[in-house]
Image (cartoon, rainbow, N blue to C red):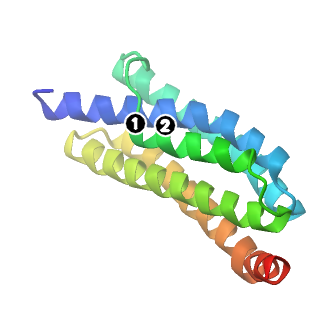
Amino acid sequence: MKTFEELFLNELKDLYNSEKQFTTVLLKMSMAANNADLKKAFMQTVEETQKQIARLDQVFKQLKESSSGSHSDAMDGLFKEAQTLIKSDYAPLVRDAALINCAQRIHHYQIALYGILKTFSKHLKLDKIQKLFEESLQEEKETNHILTQIAEKGGLNEQALRRSA
């Protein structure tokens, strides 16, 4: 990469690829989850992710660029970890706590990328695109908050601890 624009496009493709893969992983995580609120949160996140992919498609269209060509080794690692957790022999509530942990790490990565791309688009004077990134960034933050609520205020972590002790 030589230019700021190329860096921007590479990060955009990385995010697009991770969102596409995350949809499949989320469906599997939902099926593996024991807690009803967690299952529901994962399914709502699938719908949200599909909207975010549609926004990213708009970005590629506005830029007149292809969405193919990049992936993230970091996200690949997180997705492999999710697959391992899904197949694990953890007690059901412990698996749920682990799935939340993994999902939050994925969301934190996506929060970082949406924030980076929002900032890059500001510097590139891509105001409409910047607003699309902001919308997705806020959704990612809200989803992370919901997962924390399930784990902490919903008592999932505490229940997992009591059941595994």
Could you say whether the residue bearing mark 2 is in a helix, strand or loop? helix
Which residue is the site of mark 2? Answer: 76
Query: Quick one: label 2, few (<14), some, or many (20+) residues within 10 Å?
Result: some
- The quarter in which the N terminus is drawn is top left
- The quarter in which the C terminus is drawn is bottom right
Three-letter amino acid code at the position of disc 2: Asp
Above or below 108: residue 162 = below
Three-letter amino acid code at the position of disc 1: Asp
Above or below 58: residue 137 = below
Where residue 161 appears, x then y in whole percent? 76, 80
35 sits to left or right of 132: right
The CA span between labels 2 and 1 is 5 Å
Q: Is residue 162 visible?
A: yes
Residue drawn 76% across and 62% down? 96
Circle number at residue 73: 1
Above or below 18: residue 91 = below
Q: Nearer the viewer, residue 81 or 40?
A: 81
Q: Nearer the viewer, residue 33 or 148?
A: 33
Residue at the left extreme of this rendering: 2
Could you say whether the residue bearing mark 1 is in a helix, strand or loop? helix
Where residue 46 appears, x then y in whole percent? 71, 42
Where residue 16 appears, x then y in whole percent? 48, 32
Query: Quick one: label 1, few (<14), some, or many (20+) residues within 10 Å?
Result: few
Where residue 94 appears, x then y in whole percent? 76, 67
Residues marked 2 and 1 touching at CB (< 8 Å): yes
Q: Nearer the viewer, residue 107 or 5?
A: 107
Circle number at residue 135: none
Residue drawn 48% across and 42% down? 77
Above or below 130: residue 38 = below
> How many numbered marks are there?
2
Residue drawn 30% across and 30% down? 10
